[in-house]
Amino acid sequence: MEKRESLSNRVIKLIKNDIAQGKFKLNEKIPAEPELMQLYSVGRSSIREAIKTLAISGILKVQQGSGTFVNSFVSAETIEQRLKRADFDQINAVRKLLEGEIVKLAAQNNSAIHITQIEQNLEKRKLAIQSENRQACVDADIAFHMAIAQASLNNVLADLYESFTLIIRDFFSKREAQGISHFAMSHHLHEQLFKAIKAQKVKQAGQLIQQILDNNY
């Protein structure tokens, strides 16, 4: 059973890739089962499971008596690639929603280990500012927010935030001329955010992260 499920998952990836590459076009009929079996070198059951899964997700549409059609386009881009070409205002709007939820969950769910990790990265941020080491500031700032994401105990949110860190690094690189000034100006807010999360003050933590992001810190 495990082998069949593994094969069907492989077929799902192959079909999605063929749609992304334009081999199977939007609204067009994909090959019949026998041809797909030969194309992907798997049995009928694996093809049927893959088509069923893709139909449930809306990528394919099965029309009885007519065949199976491509119902939606699949992008070949990774989420990181899509984020890189997105408008900064859109990125920042999503980041506000994402971090707003993350800090609230972190305030509710954090453990002593999480608090230690957040505090250690906050201290690294402070030391980087004092030594005027810009790259260390960038690294510590991102590590601080990433530790908060991990403290949320929501792995999906943490993974999404990790994808955003690539864009955040790019944003910081564009502000290189500012040196460490914006890190220094916002450090008191980061300290207050840490204290709010540690004290499990959910509302205050949410307000502080919005203040940080509203000022593009």
Image: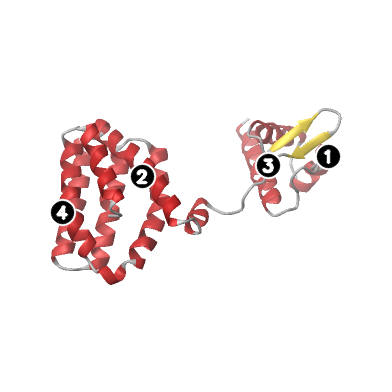
Q: Is residue 134 above or below residue 163?
A: below
Q: Nearer the viewer, residue 217 or 102?
A: 217
Q: CA distance from mark 2 to mark 3?
A: 29 Å
Point out the tag, 3 or 4, that comes first from the N-terminus: 3
- In this rendering, which labeled residue sits more in front, label 2 or label 3? 2
Point out the tag, 1 or 3, that comes first from the N-terminus: 1
Q: Which residue is mark 1?
A: 34
Q: On the rendered structure, is 50 left or right of 119?
A: right
Q: CA distance from mark 3 to mark 4?
A: 48 Å
Image coordinates of residue 15 in percent, x first then y, are 70, 45
Quarter the N terminus occupies: top right
Dot 3, how many residues are within 10 Å of its Cα: few (below 14), some (14-19), or many (20+)?
some
Label number found at residue 72: 3
- Amino acid found under the numbered disc labelled 3: Ser
Q: CA distance from mark 1 to mark 2?
A: 49 Å
- Amino acid found under the numbered disc labelled 4: Glu
Q: CA distance from mark 4 to mark 2?
A: 24 Å
Q: Which residue is mark 2?
A: 96
Residue lying at the far bottom of the rendered structure: 177
- Amino acid found under the numbered disc labelled 2: Lys
Q: Nearer the viewer, residue 155 or 202?
A: 202
Point out the tag, 4 or 2, that comes first from the N-terminus: 2
